[in-house]
Image: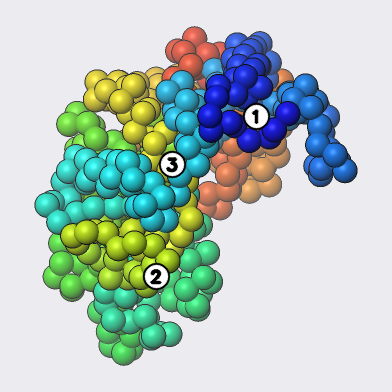
Amino acid sequence: MEPFASPHNLDRELHSLLAEASSNLCDWFAESGSQGPMPDSFDLPKAFPDEKGVSNKVLLNDLQLLMNGSYRPSHPRALAHLDPPPLSASIVGELICAGLNNNLLAEELSPSLTCLERNLCKWFCQKLGLGDLSGGVAASGGSLSNLMALVIARNISGLENDPSAVFFASDDCHVSFLKSLKIMGLKQESLQKVPTDEKGKLDISYLSSNLKKIKSQGKKCFAVVATAGTTVRGAIDPLSEISQLCKKEKIWLHVDGAIGGIYGLSTITSEIVQGLDSADSITVNPQKLLGIAKTSSLLLVANKNHLSSTFSTGLPYAEPIAGNDFHGGELGIQGTRSAESLKLWIGLRQLGEEGIEKILLESIKRRCYLESIIDSSKFKIISGPLHLLALTPINYTYSQASDWSIKTRNSLLVNNFMLSRPIYGDRYYLKAVMGNPNTKFEDLKILANLINHSII
């Protein structure tokens, strides 16, 4: 048996392998509801190759071991993180993407898929109101999209060689910006943290005064980061006000919309992220709510030329593209890159705009419903306008809240509810993410009852 598909005839070995693997995956989905979100225990196959290759039967058995030990995002009570179950079409897209094995590095290595990515990014830009000059590039996760946005901002500002350059973000900004500091060779103080208000939003008055302060110190700011959907509570920074300030000060505005940016796709929910259209760059992660198989992140920019002016070094080993377009490897940090936009495209095609809107609206309905049935006399609940909420007992000390969160999370797991346990401010919380379409109101009633009775 050859391990590569025949380019001349139907490869029946491949056909059989794919068919059986697909059948096993479908069985795994079908049994997810009767299992817990997390496996009780599991066995691992060998992590290294034997001297000789093994049969398809052995491969399938080994795959089954890994599947048995995997987290099950399809479980109706898997509510811990921003990891919904995948759309069926997106699974197919991942398979086809792997089979095609095209490379978004250069157009000649991915003719149709390069054009598809450009057009898909343009559609996102138009839906989010970024204007006629806009464009984007797919990236392997929001952390990379955020990093690329900061690199562009620093480059456009002319501060790429200034070690004292700073950028601003709220206290609740994503941890990826701390990683970006290290990668960009900046000191920790280059990230100027801005306090948040009682709703978890960036304090615009503090931002304004501290922009003036750094000017008086002889420092220059190359970007302000606004968050559209913070990680713990889903808060939205005041995007319109921040945008006005950035325009006045001529500073790049990046919106980390990895969580909330997707709500701009619907006219009903776009008000939640009002001001998104004024950004210079936006990170959007369809994987976090729309069920696009990982990874799926886009960096969108108001002026697509900023991508190539920052990252293009030329590709001397690839044929130039006619016109003003650039190869995919000249639009971001990544060179070799799979066609992740394929699974995004096919997933969105499967949903349609009505399906996208339904997912967005129902996620908010689930959050509102759960919030309404949690005993507010016992628990402090923090949330925003999106599909996340977190809660902690009122008047507990740090130690008491920590003990409660551990005990309650474990007792919820016994009932197959998986919530996460973030630390926020001065205490531990339990966080529920309402992005799982398999979660029903009946599940949430049971969850609320368990939580409400966790404190006597």
Q: Relative to residue 433, is residue 247 drawn left or right? A: left
Q: Which residue is mark 1?
A: 71
Q: Residues within 10 Å of mark 2 (few under 14, many from 20)?
A: few
* x and y percentages locating residue 211 in the rendered image: 27, 75
The residues bearing labels 3 and 2 have C-alpha atoms spaced at a distance of 25 Å
Q: Which residue is mark 2?
A: 316
Q: Which residue is mark 3?
A: 340
**Residue flagged by tag 1: what amino acid is it?**
Tyr
Count of numbered marks: 3
**Residue flagged by tag 3: what amino acid is it?**
Glu
Circles 3, 2 touching at the beta carbon (< 8 Å)? no
Instruction: Pick whichever of labels 3 and 2 is earlier in the sequence.
Output: 2
In this view of the protein, which residue sits in the foreground, 208 or 352? 352
Q: Nearer the viewer, mark 1 or mark 2?
A: 2
Quadrant where the N terminus is found in the figure:
top right
Q: Quadrant of residue 287?
A: top left
In this view of the protein, which residue sits in the foreground, 355 or 99? 99
| Residue 258 vertical placement versus 218 (above, below) | above
**Would you say residue 174 is visible in this rendering?**
no
The local secondary structure at tag 3 comes to helix
* x and y percentages locating residue 281 in the rendered image: 27, 57
Q: Relative to residue 418, is residue 414 drawn left or right? A: right
Residue at image position (17%, 43%) is 126
